[in-house]
Amino acid sequence: MKVANPDYVVGKKPPYAMQPPVTRPSFCVCDVCPAHRQRKAQETGRTMDEVWSEPLVIRARRASPDPSNYRATAAAVQDVLVNEPLRHAAAVKAAEEAKLAKQNARCFGDIVDAYRLYMQSEGKRYDKAVSRINSSSARSAAIAMRTRSTWPTSARFWRRSHT
Ligand SMILES: [Zn+2]
């Protein structure tokens, strides 16, 4: 018997569930990956580093927007299959960039120390620069301390230090 309606089933129709296989990128940062990667490493007998450094397919279980409608559920599955890999890739990229930014960040004290050493090694005008370095360090320390204070206090401080 040929039936045009894809929702037609004999007997009671089950609710359509969404669980499409989604490929997670290597070094994925999602919530479900750690447990799945752990199990994959145990099943295959490989190291966690190997499992993390390659993509892994995990079923993405989602609630269907309309569990009684085959076409709506299938369209939502296609949407998940297209968008989820993009979302995971973007999350990995953002995490890498955040890590890199943290590695490259230098606190102001390090810069002041480097400048102080540079001026000493160059041996020129350190005596004049030292007061500027010290006042600059003191000001940045004061700013760091006053960051949590209320605005009027900060405004008074800025007026005092810039006039
Ligand atoms: Zn993941």
Image (spheres, rainbow, N blue to C red):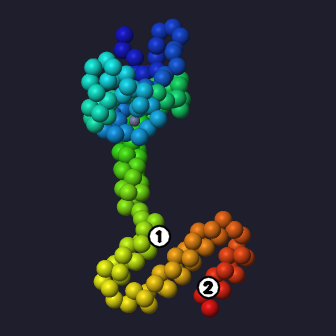
Q: Which residue is mark 1?
A: 108
Who is closer to the viewer here, 71 or 53?
Answer: 53
State the residue at coordinates (52%, 76%): 137
Residue 96 visible in the picture: yes
**Which amino acid type corresponds to the residue marked 2 in the rendered image?**
Ser
Q: x, y (%) of residue 7?
A: 46, 21
Q: Amino acid at mark 1?
A: Phe
Going from N to C along the chain, the mark reached first, 1 or 2, is 1
Picture quarter with ligand 1: top left
Query: Percent from the top left, x then y, of residue 132?
Result: 49, 85
Q: Is residue 73 visible?
A: no
Considering the image in quadrants, where does the C terminus appear? bottom right
Label 1 with label 2: CB-CB less than 8 Å: no
What crowding class fits label 2: few (fewer than 14 Cα within 10 Å), some (14-19), or many (20 or more)?
few
Residue at 61% in and 85% down:
161
Q: Does the beta carbon of the residue at mark 1 sit less than 8 Å from ligand 1?
A: no
53, above or below 1, in the image:
below
Side (left or right) of 121 relative to 72: left
Please name whichever residue, 98 or 92, is drawn nearer the observer in this view of the structure: 98
- Residue under the point 41% across and 46% down: 91
Counting the numbered discs, the total is: 2
Read off the residue under disc 2.
161
SS of the residue under disc 2: helix
User: What residue occupies the far top of the structure in this picture?
Assistant: 11
Query: Between residues 156 and 89, which one lies in front from this camera angle?
Result: 156
SS under mark 1: helix
The span from disc 1 to disc 2 (Cα, nearest Å) is 18 Å
Disc 2 within 8 angstroms of ligand 1 (CB)? no
Q: Is residue 68 shown above or below 77?
A: above
Q: Position of residue 111 (x, y in %)?
A: 41, 72
